[in-house]
Amino acid sequence: MEQNLNFVTVIFLLILNNFLLSSCNEDTSWTSYHTQNSLPNNDTLTELSQTNSSTVPTTSEATTRLETTTIVPEPIKKPCESIIGNISNVVSKFYRCSIERARPYRFCTKCLQDYIAAIDLYSDIASASKNSTLVICKNLLIKSDYAPLIPSVFQDIKTLWSSAYCSSCYSVFDDKTELNNKTVKFIDSYKEMIGCIENNTYSQMNICQACIANYKKLNSDFRTIEDYSSPSICMDVMDMMNYTRLLWSQDCPTKNRQSNTVLTVSVSVSLIIITIIYYVCMYLIGKGKLFNFCYYNSLSNNSNNLYRSISDIPGINTPSASSQR
């Protein structure tokens, strides 16, 4: 019985093996058939590449098409390029001068020419009406933007100049802007003062003694400017005076300062003494009035008592008794 089962099992395995082999052969033939019919040969690939190259645009062609469709802003025309160069030149010179003259402060007296050059250039452009080149540049540079940069820059220049009260240093004669006489006199006095200090730097007492006349002269010239143009005093003049006073106060406790101190103390003591005298007088006067009041009050009381005592004596008629009769 066992032998028959083994025989049947062997036959079954042989049949299964033949079936699997036949199915594998069919799959192989199907795959090779479809591979041959689906994959293109070299000629077909060449034709496809030529077709794609003729229909699909290249990178350079796509960039060219994009540039033709992009809105390019209007370029600055040739005549305006030189004007823009002039604007940048005068503006940079002005700001460079203002930064270099910030300490010590000599902005007003040293940057006048740069300021005039910048303002004149902007005025020529802004007021252009006949010259066609300037009119074109005016419309292109000043009026074309919602937030115009060039007018804002020149407005900042004007604001910087006016905030330092630089116009107080100058006077205009025949369309020429020059330092006025008061400013020139003050600057000369300042130079003399600084020269005196530099020549007497080895001794503090020499500075105080030798330069006192120069210091008083400088103060007098400054008061003249202060009375004439206060409160809009040119900042160059103000800086010179402040610097000189600082040096003088550090090195020289002058007689003026001592006299001012003595005067202040004297006035304070006088006020205190006057106040004390006032209250003492008021006290004495008030006390005298009180004494008189008490004295007269005591006299009236004594007279009343005397009158009553006399009226009590029999046989003596008082005015009140006769009036009753």
Image (cartoon, rainbow, N blue to C red):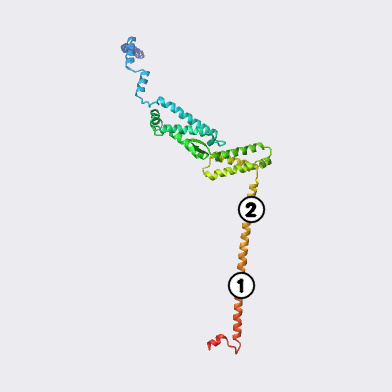
Q: Earlier in the sequence, mark 2 or mark 1?
A: 2
Position in image of residue 234 (x %, y %):
53, 40
Viewer-side residue, 20 vs 108: 108
Mark seen at residue 265: 2
Residue of label 1: 292
Position in image of residue 116 (x %, y %):
48, 33
Residue at the (47%, 37%) spot, across then down: 158
Label 1: few (<14), some or many (≥20) within 10 Å?
few
Image position of 146 with respect to 220: above or below: above
SS type, badge 1:
helix
SS type, badge 2:
helix
Amino acid at dot 1: Asn
Residue at the (62%, 42%) spot, across then down: 215
Label 2: few (<14), some or many (≥20) within 10 Å?
few
Amino acid at dot 2: Val
Q: Toward which corner of the image does residue 43 lie, by quadrant?
A: top left
Give the spatial CA distance, label 2 vs label 1: 41 Å
**134 left or right of 231 in image:** left
Image position of 323 with respect to 94: above or below: below
